[in-house]
Image (cartoon, grey):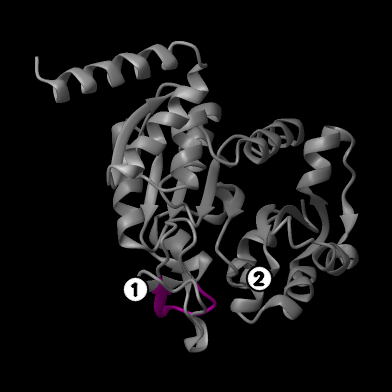
């Protein structure tokens, strides 16, 4: 055995010995960092009985590979609330996932509850991985897919692509910002009501909408009136920076107040559970203004008058 091969063998034995002394989660972190450093761009793995294909990125991919879930606290909190409130009932069994990315929300929700879902994702690379993840987990009959962006009016939109696949955003009015580092993509856009109709669903089948639309949440609200009129609640991300980028920060609270009369701060819901009382919609402006820079964003559960 030559010296180079001997040295490599010693290094491998030392590494294997070290890995035996750390926990499973730490081993996964080491493996993920190693994959990224060796130039791996895409990976397929199994976690908690689900098969995932995704990009090797530092955000969603890392969380899924290490812990098998993304936004787990928010999703488990919402699930508990849905069960307590009877949100999923009878034929009202469809969850709309706006900004579905690769399926990290809709796939676990469908498996956990047995519901159906409509996953809405405009960016091609994300959509293809979403489709593959749905098919790999044998959920094609329960999760409908729509490669579209949600907009106030049907048409075409220009998406600004970033290095983080969960952070692509609409390049509205030519504004792109410093995050426009991976090019652009033209996508089809439609109203939320239009997307639901195109998928062959009726408003009466929709139980709840989950929206993580990178600042386009007001588009979701204004184009989904038919749902809010039927009492469908909306779980939405509120990120001031993204709202500013879309020109809707000052209008968001007022737009929400047109269709919703109460909301629950997800932070209170996670902390207090069923004891978290809804707040009047008039307090939404104060909540948005109170989001600290280090918090970046928060989620809110918007309740329409007919809920």
Nearest the eye: 98 or 186: 186
Q: Which secondary structure, mark 1?
A: loop
Type of secondary structure dominating the magenta stretch: strand
What label does residue 160 carry, if any?
none
Q: Residue at x 67, y 64 (%)?
A: 239
Residue 285 image offset from top left, x and y in percent? 84, 69
The verdict on residue 159 being magenta is yes
The verdict on residue 209 being magenta is no
Tell whether 147 sits left or right of 176.
left
Residue bearing mark 2? 241
Nearest the eye: 118 or 229: 118
The stretch of residues the image draws in magenta is: 151-160
Residue 170 image offset from top left, x and y in percent? 48, 74
307 is higher (above) or lower (below) than 193: above
Residue 10 image offset from top left, x and y in percent? 27, 16
Q: Which secondary structure, mark 2?
A: helix
Q: Earlier in the sequence, mark 1 or mark 2?
A: 1
Dividing the picture into quarters, in which one does residue 187 lie? bottom left
Residue bearing mark 1? 183
Which residue is at the far left? 1
Residue 103 image offset from top left, x and y in percent? 43, 44
How far apart marks 1 and 2 lie (CA) works out to 20 Å
Sort mark 2 into few (<14), some (14-19) or many (20+) by Cα contacts within 10 Å: some
Q: Residue at x 47, y 56 (%)?
A: 166
Q: Residue at x 43, y 30 (%)?
A: 30
């Amino acid at each position: 055995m030559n010296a180079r091969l001997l040295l490599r063998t010693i290094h491998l034995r030392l590494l294997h010995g070290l890995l035996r002394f750390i926990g499973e989660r730490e081993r996964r972190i080491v493996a993920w960092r190693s994959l990224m450093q060796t130039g791996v761009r895409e990976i397929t793995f199994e976690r908690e009985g689900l098969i995932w294909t995704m990009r090797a990125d530092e955000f969603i991919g890392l969380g899924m590979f290490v812990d098998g879930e993304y936004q787990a606290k928010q999703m488990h909190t919402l699930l508990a609330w849905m069960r307590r409130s009877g949100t999923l009932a009878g034929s009202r069994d469809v969850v709309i996932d706006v900004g579905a990315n690769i399926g990290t929300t809709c796939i676990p929700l469908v498996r956990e509850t047995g519901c159906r879902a409509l996953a809405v994702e405009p960016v091609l690379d994300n959509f293809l991985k979403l489709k593959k993840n749905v098919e790999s987990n044998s959920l094609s009959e329960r999760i409908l897919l729509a490669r579209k962006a949600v907009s106030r009016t049907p048409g075409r939109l220009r998406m600004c692509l970033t290095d983080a696949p969960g952070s692509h955003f609409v390049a509205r009015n030519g504004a792109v910002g410093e995050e426009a580092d991976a090019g652009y993509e033209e996508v089809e856009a439609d109203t939320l009501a239009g997307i639901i109709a195109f998928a062959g669903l009726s408003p009466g089948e929709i139980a709840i909408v989950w929206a993580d639309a990178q600042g386009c949440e007001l588009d979701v609200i204004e184009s989904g009136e038919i749902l809010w009129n039927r009492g469908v609640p909306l779980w939405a991300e509120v990120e001031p920076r993204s709202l500013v980028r879309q020109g809707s920060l000052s209008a968001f609270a007022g737009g929400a107040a047109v269709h919703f009369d109460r909301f629950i701060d997800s932070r209170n819901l996670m902390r207090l559970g069923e004891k978290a009382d809804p707040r009047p919609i008039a307090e939404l402006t104060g909540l948005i203004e109170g989001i600290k820079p280090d918090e970046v964003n928060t989620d809110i559960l918007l309740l329409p008058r007919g809920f």
